[in-house]
Image (cartoon, coloured by chain):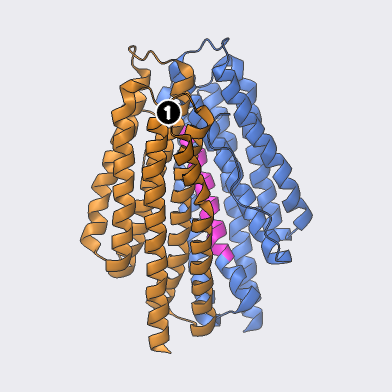
Chain colours: A orange, B blue
Amino acid sequence: MRQAYHISLSNLSELGARMCGVASACLRDATVAVLEADLSLAEQVMARDVELDELRAQAEAQAFDLLALQAPVASDLRTVVSALWIVADLQRMGALAMHIAKAARRRHPQHVVPVTVRTMVERMGSVGVHLADQAGTVLMSRDVQLARSMEAEDDLMDGLQQDMYQAMLDPSWSAGVAPAVDLALLARFYERFGDHAVAVARRVVFLVTGENIGGDTTPSIPV
Amino acid sequence: MRQAYHISLSNLSELGARMCGVASACLRDATVAVLEADLSLAEQVMARDVELDELRAQAEAQAFDLLALQAPVASDLRTVVSALWIVADLQRMGALAMHIAKAARRRHPQHVVPVTVRTMVERMGSVGVHLADQAGTVLMSRDVQLARSMEAEDDLMDGLQQDMYQAMLDPSWSAGVAPAVDLALLARFYERFGDHAVAVARRVVFLVTGENIGGDTTPSIPV
């Protein structure tokens, strides 16, 4: 019984890590799609929706089986419930990557991202991809130090979001209102993607140490 | 045992309904705060953060106790796990209302909302408040018909969000880039608030009927 329990738990972590891999790949490709106005890549990203739905459904079924058949208590119970929250965060990360891909499709063949802020979008993309990859590693390794280090990288993401807003509010902004509206939302999607990756890492820290390292404190609107 | 279980479950619904009440009041006040540039009201909204944290913590503690002490299975298990998801949605609704209040504080004494789109913001606010109120009723009554009717009202919210984007992209938009960036995010916060209220209702429908009435299909970026 106990062994079956641990095998199921490790399967759950593995499903989570696979979801991180998909979310990370989706964000990487969605970022290329908006930067290069690549319609076919945008559509490839959007087609991966079902993959995440499927992985989440598998994880939820496993977690429900664990709860129903093993009736875990104390920290075992918290681990299983955390897995349910974690896969919800991971699916949301995928949905946010898809929102970015959809922007590329909607504006195609036009570009969503003006040349002046290309580098910022590239950086938001690479920070997001790295956060998702690290969340996957944390799920498998339960490496608390790595999980904590993600906080600083998420601050970097918030900083990039603010830089983007500053660029749009600057008198030198010449791209007009429409790209600003697109980019305001795009930056928000990247920032939320990072938040969810960090939320996953925080849940692991909490499970390992019992220590709650803070909630949703990211800025909500341009400073 | 069985009776204690049902009392706990109904306590859980009540905590959820109270959270709906707080989220609804926060959105109502946050909307007045952005429309009237009312700093003190914005700050009152932001202070209610702890109230939602506290209610969610209570609900989670009850749900964990139920899982640990009663080891529910089948639909009972699904009900308790759903409660955990529901309170997460409700807390997020509160956070979104606070993001709106923060926008009022950040721009004070300036107005966030140009006169030309005041009515749209007012309507998004009243639709959101109504959705939160209905979610509270659905939690207590498990009224599937009411839950389903919320879908149409959420479509109205999505339509208002699109109207807002159209207004900003129209050549007649004279307010410039900065208010457009604020409003793009504001409209997104209202729309997500509605999504979470509907997500709560959908979970109740699923618990009562076993029928899954769809996922997160709202548009992500201006059409």
Nearer to me, A48 or B198: A48
**Bounds of the magenta span?**
B82-102
Q: Quadrant of the C terminus of chain A?
A: top left
Q: Secondary structure at mark 1?
A: helix
Which residue shows up at 24% across the image and 46% down it? Answer: A152
Which residue shows up at 24% across the image and 55% down it? Answer: A148
Q: Magenta segment, principal secondary structure?
A: helix
Which residue shows up at 34% across the image and 52% down it? Answer: A132
Q: Is residue B23 left or right of residue B155?
A: left
Q: Is residue B52 left or right of residue B196?
A: left
Judging from the image, mark 1 belongs to the subunit labelled A
| Magenta segment includes B84 | yes
Q: Is residue B204 left or right of residue A34?
A: right
Looking at the picture, how far across and down is residue B3, in whole percent?
A: 66, 80
**Residue B53 higher or lower than B112, as above or below:** below
Looking at the picture, how far across and down is residue A221, in whole percent?
A: 42, 32
Looking at the picture, how far across and down is residue B141, in whole percent?
A: 74, 59
| Labels in figure, total | 1
Nearer to me, B25 or A41: A41
On the question of residue B109 being in view, the answer is: no
**Residue B64 higher or lower than B124, as above or below:** below
Q: Which residue is mark 1?
A: A183
